[in-house]
Image (cartoon, rainbow, N blue to C red):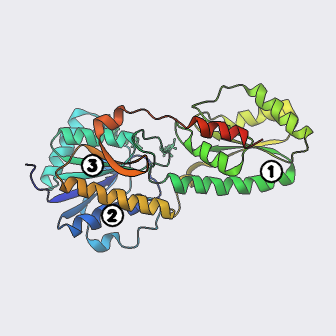
Amino acid sequence: MAKEIKTIGVLTSGGDAPGMNAAIRAVAREAMARGKTVKGIRRGYTGLLAEDIVDLEARDVSNIIGRGGTILQTARCPEFMTEEGQEKGAEICRKHGIDSVVVIGGDGSYRGAQKLAAHGINTIGVPGTIDLDISCTDYTIGFDTAVNTAMEAIDKVRDTASSHERCTIIEVMGRHAGYIALWCGIGCGAEQILIPETYDYDEQAIVDDIIDSIKRGKKHYIIVIAEGIGHSTSMARRFEAATGMETRATILGYMQRGGSPTCKDRLYASTMGAMAVELLCQGKSNRVVAYKDGEFTDFDIDEALAMEKHISEFQVAIGKSLNV
Ligand code: ADP
Ligand code: F6P
């Protein structure tokens, strides 16, 4: 029989994502409702190793559900990649009476949680990243806000591209994954969506299509490109030279990570944060919360990290067929 947990630590790690605050709030409030003590670990694993740990009371998480960013701050921590760092982190948890930790972050952060669990601290991961690049889950906190932010920005860029009869290349985030580009490319009816999973680097085919679209009287030509392909500025120069159509590049950048989370992000973050506490109270550890095939569920971290993710071939296809 697993020992009853008493004190839950919560941290955010890796890139911030809108909805992380809603997840922190859910962890804190659900834990308090079950009579647990809650501690906030600031600045991810960096703050853990620096013992930057604060008590969280119910009021400390008031009015944060609609705020972007993370009140606990976040960081990337190379020291936690080492065995010594991980052992030290677990010791610090014990020193502060923390028997369990909820880690809100991406794949990398899950690996940290896995190591903490191996050193005797109960851990549950909650998927927080705008990139949607975690294999075990169809949803990650922050993605919905990020794609809506990007979509609105692309709609605005389209207005000016259309007025000036320009080609415009808009680069969106996603690290090595193309989900943000695919979603907002379909959502905006972009003429081209270039994602690392499928892009064949055939620039001539794109140049031919731009020239063809000019002949058909199109007033603008929108290309959404994922940062995993990158080089949008030099691509714009090449396309302008080859097509004669004025071409601009816009890199949307960090605006995609900020802003007030959408209702979907708030709801999923609330559900997943509370589920993490539920799992800990059931005596579970080394697991991650996920949303898979229409259900909230959980997986062993080792299994979750071994899973592969595939982008929808059908959506890639309609990104071409619908956007003629
Ligand atoms: P994300 O969680 O968004 O994928 P990172 O990959 O940057 O972001 O990982 C966040 C942090 O998680 C890293 O800075 C490091 O502290 C920790 N981490 C990543 N990989 C490992 C690992 N293999 N072992 C222990 N900790 C890790
Ligand atoms: O993982 C979220 C993300 O915004 C990626 O889309 C991007 O590649 C990366 O983080 C940028 O990281 P940094 O904040 O270190 O520049």
Out of 81 and 134, give the one closest to the viewer.
134
- Which of the 4 image quarters holds residue 198? top right
In the rendered structure, find residue 161 and report the number of the disc placed on it. Answer: 1
Residue drawn at x 44%, y 49% as measured from the top left:
140
Residue drawn at x 42%, y 38% as measured from the top left:
135
- Which of the 4 image quarters holds residue 234? top right
- Mark 2–mark 1 distance (CA, rounded to whole Å): 42 Å
Residue drawn at x 51%, y 62% as measured from the top left:
262
In the rendered structure, find residue 124 and report the number of the disc placed on it. Answer: 3
- Mark 2–mark 3 distance (CA, rounded to whole Å): 14 Å
- Confirm whether residue 72 shows in the render: no
**What x and y, as percent, mark residue 307?**
38, 33
Say if mark 3 contacts mark 1, CB within 8 Å.
no
Residue drawn at x 40%, y 58% as measured from the top left:
269
Return the disc, 2 or 1, that comes first in the chain's sequence: 2
Q: Secondary structure at mark 3?
A: strand
Q: Residues within 10 Å of mark 2 (few under 14, many from 20)?
A: many
- Mark 3–mark 1 distance (CA, rounded to whole Å): 46 Å
Question: For mark 2, what is the residue?
Answer: 26
Relative height, residue 48 to residue 243 (above, below): below
**What x and y, as percent, mark residue 316?**
62, 37
Q: Amino acid at mark 1?
A: Ala
